[in-house]
Image (spheres, helix red, strand yellow):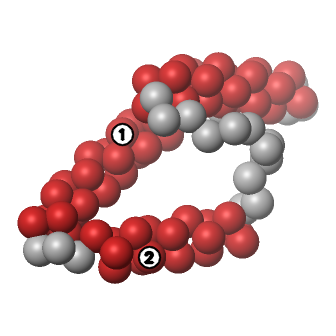
Amino acid sequence: MAPLDVRFQENILAIAYHRINAVLEEAYRLDKTIYFNFQLNEFLEELERQWPPSTKLEPSMEVDKTAKLFHERLEKVRRAKQRSKPRD
């Protein structure tokens, strides 16, 4: 896994964050945030059923702090995967 792989995954998260915000804006405009929150929670629970979270970290309300923390964690996983691959 190359450093660009981590960046690609971070870009996916950034796009998802943008899309979620854009949809929330419309739900808020239509007074449908209860439904938005329900559907988002259902979606996240489905992801967690398929890939249980690797840690029990406390959630942060600071997006930048979360992005930095998980960048470091993804880099750590990437390096570990790189070391475990057999060399040709």
Quarter location, residue 86: top right
Q: Is residue 28 above or below residue 42?
A: above
- Residue denoted by label 2: 38
Instruction: Give the left or right position of residue 48, taking residue 34 as reference.
Output: right
Look at mark 1 in the image and give the residue it sits on.
14
Asked which secondary structure carries label 1, the reply is helix
Marks 1/2: CA–CA distance: 21 Å
Q: Which amino acid type is marked by label 2?
A: Phe
Residue 67 appears in view: no
Along the viewing direction, whichever of 27 and 68 lies nearer the viewer: 27
Whether 52 is drawn above or below 54: the answer is: below
Evaluate if marks 1 and 2 touch, with contact meaning CB atoms under 8 Å apart.
no
Estimate the x, y position of residue 61 in percent, counting from the top left.
48, 35
For label 2, the SS is helix
- Residue drawn 74% across the image and 53% down it: 53
- Please state which of residues 57 and 72 is positioned toward the viewer in this rendering: 57
Q: Can residue 42 be seen in this view?
A: yes
**Residue 34, horizontal then vertical, whole percent:** 34, 75
The mark found on residue 79 in the picture is none
